[in-house]
Amino acid sequence: MDRSKDGGKDLAGLRIAITGGTSGLGLALVREWSAGGALVAFVARTEEGVQRIAGDVPGVAGIVGDVSKKDQIYPIALQVLGRLGGINVLVNNASSLGPVPLAPLGDTACEDLEVALTTNLLGPFRLTKALLGALRASAAEGRGAVVLNVSSDAAVTPYPGWGAYGASKAALHHLSAIWALELQEEGIGVLSLDPGDMDTPLHRLAVPDADASTLLRPEVAARNLTRSIMAELAELATLHRRKREAA
Amino acid sequence: MIAASDPVQRPPGAKLLAVDARGRIRHLPRRQFAALVRRGDAVIANDAATLPASLAGVHGPTHRRIEVRLAQRGSLEPDDVRDFNAIVLGEGDYRVRTEDRPPPPSLAPGDSLQLGPLRATVSYLLGHPRFVALRLHGSPQEIWSGLALHGRPIQYAHVRVPLRLWDVWTSIASVPAAFEPPSAGFALDWLVLDDLRRRGVSFATITHAAGISSTGDAALDALLPLDEPYFISRSTAEAIAQARARGGRIVAVGTTVVRALEAAALDRGLVRAGSGVAKQRIVRDTRLRVVDALLSGTHEPGTTHHALLEAFADDATLLRADRELASHDYRTHEFGDSIFVERRDSAWLRSRPMASAIA
């Protein structure tokens, strides 16, 4: 990956936590931010996957945890804040499709909908809430704080067969919009962005026969999201400066 | 007072006893806290998240069960997690009152301790059989994950159900640095912060490694509070300077904030930004240089927290306050009700340069 020097400087000193960091978009974000000089922590479910990536990307903090489990949220938050010493950016990326293979809602087990909701909605809600004080502290320092919830076009368009996933992402999208308004005065940005259809393990589970050449490479999607996060951080920093000058 | 035994940070009926600078007392619901501060004031809270600092385990040489309560760390640096000073208790857990807990087996330098997934070695004793310096083994990640998976919040017998981290992290909890929760901050939620903002009150935080409140041993308790590292950001130092410049007061949320701000005090009520260690004890004769008012939990006379109040108000006023707390069924301890105390004649003292000599 070829990064310009300026891009590297932009990310230096920022602290980011990424859930679902061992494959697809999450892993691409781990690599992107680590190469850019940020302090990176990532979360994934298996010890083995975490060790693999932590060994592969030097200097990143790998945390074993499952964001869909209520009891694991605070242990994850503790390790994120312990290792990073604070946080500027949280990317809630870990996602569940619900039923695999995808199924019409009539054939969707309640348990599969629950898994989609706990992973895609409750997990991001709980983790964001646990880290909100730390995000507030970063915002007060003027470097900005951003929560990025990874969304999908399925959050706004009703695709048959994507009921569990689409409903959970729609809820996350709306949650993000409300939280963004509520946290405006604190200087914390909350984004909900659709990275586009990517060539990732999740997409292969959903659409096994998709033509990979028509899909975005996760590295490209990661770079696009990074640009959006940096633009939001820059805007928040400007607002913060103006507020201070007015005070 | 009544011991608050449920781990609820903001019970709907939480009460607040307010003592103003002239010693007048009134009672109000704690959710109306923002009504006590004025436009232009700065409210400063401790944003330290609470470590799961209670580690159950086994003393290697004797195979006896112990509980290690981490109590002190040299700095707030993320990777500075190997060396702690700790209180070691014998068998049992929080359900037994700390003062009734058996002592640990005799501890010596080099003793190994197995604390769940964490392994530690006693580095040296700190002048008391229960008080040791210890070193945790492993990488910072192994130590943080060991604490996260095995540690529990330090807890006392008055709270009956086992505490979870979410019970003790305040709404504004940031870097995990406190050994017990900076519980005055339980009064704060996002609605209160919004209320303060609307009233033209600035809000800022410091990070202070709030230490343990009780060891179960009178000789050790006499050493409390231990030296505590803190960090004051530039923006918080600025918020204090701006409040001063516009004639506002500095309102501390919690005794740890008083300790940190007074340790970092400069002239004219300003504070130095940066890291430091609070060593000073704040007592009756301490001249407060920064803090004008304090929101705190309720404390029984005779405790170090109560002694700190004596720096704010005179004995007669505090005696009246204590009586009111008792007669109005206030609840005490970390999940209890609160008290708000304005420093007596603080505005008058500050407006006259000679006042310190007179006081």
Image: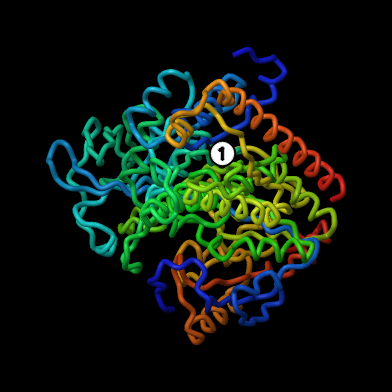
Nearest the viewer among B19 and B237 is B237
Left or right, residue B46 beside residue B109: right
Residue at screen point 64% across, 81% down: B25
Residue furthest to the bottom in view is B327
Q: Residue furthest right?
A: A246
Q: Which of A210 and A130 is in front in this view?
A: A210
- Subunit of mark 1? A
Type of amino acid at the residue the image marks with label 1: Val
> In the rendering, at what x and y percent does residue B71 appear?
39, 46
Quadrant in which the C terminus of chain B appears:
bottom right
Q: Residue B92 lies in what quarter of the image?
A: bottom left
Helix, strand or loop at disc 1? Answer: strand
Place of residue A126 in the rendered image (x, y in percent of width and height, measured from the top left)? 49, 52
Q: Residue at x 55, y 48 (%)?
A: A169
Q: Is residue B264 visible?
A: yes
Which quadrant of the figure has residue B254? bottom right
Residue position marked by numbered label 1 in the rendering: A91
